[in-house]
Image (cartoon, grey):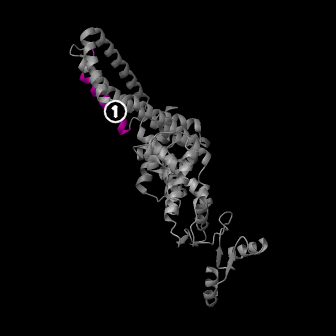
Amino acid sequence: MMFEIFNKNAVCHDLKSALILHDENDKETRDKQITDFKEGRIDFLFVYSMLLTGFDAPRLKKLYLGRKVKSHNLLQTLTRVNRPYKDFRIGYVVDFADISKEFDVTNKAYFDELNREYDTATTGENENDVFGSLFMSKDEIDEKVRNFISVLSDFSTDNLELFSQQVIAITDREAILKLKKALENAREVYNIARLIGDTETLKEIDFKLISQLLAEVSNRLQLLNLQNAITDVDSRELLNVAIEGVVFDFAKVGEEMLQMLANDLQETAHRTRDELRNNWYQKDPEWVSLYEEFRNLLAKRDIANTDFDSETAKFMSQELLQIYNRIKELNRKNSVLATKFDGDKKYARIFKSQEESGTISNRIWLYDVLRTAKITIDNRVSENEGMLANEAYFKRDVGQILVNSFETVKQEIDASIITNLTEVTASEYLGEYTTI
């Protein structure tokens, strides 16, 4: 009926249409009608229980629904209009059948199924549910792609073993949650892109790699959750019991227990000192701050002093352990950063001179500039090490290479940043040269 009504009114507008039913016409006729529509010779197709699957016509940008479609057939039907076509990035659905409730149910079920199929570990994190909208806009997809690329840029994702080591070293649960969320976003975008046939986005995501990385991160989060469960159960009561026990033990065993605690303090102090020494960027404001805290803490009390008692030892132990954990974490981050420059500590220091956090995702453009410049400078120095003997010449060469690198990565040139980078970069190379 709709087909007949349309044809009566379409004549004056020179619009052509075709009716495709499973029990009318032969296959050859239907195939020709489909081809004519795809190539623009037919303007409208009227179908019933046909062309739900296996029908790919990018020029189809508007779909009129005259009856309810359910479950998987609904998703297949709606995604017929979600293919990019010329300047059209989205499609339209004109709903005469009120499918909104059915869509919500079907869409939720689809993503629940994806979660069950692809989740590699159970963490109990309700906030990380990856249910999302099937009809995510192109801008939203692109934003999620940029986000997870940015987060992953701080890790060595091209080496699974190295990535695993970097993840295992993370003790901050929030950092693991952020990384896990980024990987889940990547997986979600991949599934949506696969469903709607967005080949452009699919090329940007290695699904197998994302699954492997997510497995590593989920395992780490599971372990941190277990550790938290052990330490957080009835934490206030456990703390009260622990304090009572310490006081009782000191009162009972006297100087022997105090000496044991003093020995533990000394061992922690040695480990902290070693971690501070092992840091290879001691101009880092964070390192300077930790060094000052460490020195001031040791200056507070002399372990050999007669004033040293159990309360002093207890609070010194807590403060010292905090400093040790922080310097160890700083060294871990520095190690990850150096790895991103193929283990070259010079460039890790250069990067941190501009970005104190050492987080590549905060300034990806800077990382790209330095990676590009590093290749050229290393080649120049390798071919002519003598150029390092002429400091002025070398600095000019480094400055020009950095300018070229800015242009290569299409980053707006900032004279002050280039001047600063030139000084720091040249200084790192010259410093390395004079110590050889």
Residue 8 seen in the current view: yes
- For the N terminus, the image quarter is bottom right
The answer to which quarter of the image holds residue 54 is: bottom right
How packed is label 1: few (under 14 Cα within 10 Å), some, or many (20 or more)?
some
The residue nearer to you, when weighing 374 against 179, is: 179
> x, y percentage for residue 143?
49, 57
Q: Say whether residue 98 is left or right of residue 249.
A: right
The answer to which quarter of the image holds residue 199 is: bottom right
Secondary element at image label 1: helix
Residue segment shown in magenta: 284-303
Residue at position x 49%, y 38% in the image:
336
Residue 341 seen in the current view: no
> x, y percentage for residue 408?
55, 57
The residue nearer to you, when weighing 209 against 375, is: 209
Residue at position x 56%, y 49% in the image:
113
Residue at position x 58%, y 54% in the image:
191
> Disc 1 marks which amino acid?
Leu
- Magenta stretch, main secondary structure class: helix
> x, y percentage for residue 180?
49, 44
Instruction: Decide whether residue 208 is among the magenta residues.
Output: no
Q: Say whether residue 101 is left or right of residue 251.
A: right
How many numbered discs sit on the rendered protein? 1
Task: Pick out the residue farthest to the bottom.
Answer: 12
Identify whether 90 is placed above or below 436. below
Identify whether 170 is placed above or below 116. above
Dot 1 corresponds to which residue?
Answer: 290
The residue nearer to you, when weighing 374 against 87, is: 87
Residue at position x 40%, y 23% in the image:
271
Q: Say whether residue 76 is left or right of residue 336.
A: right
> x, y percentage for residue 340?
53, 42
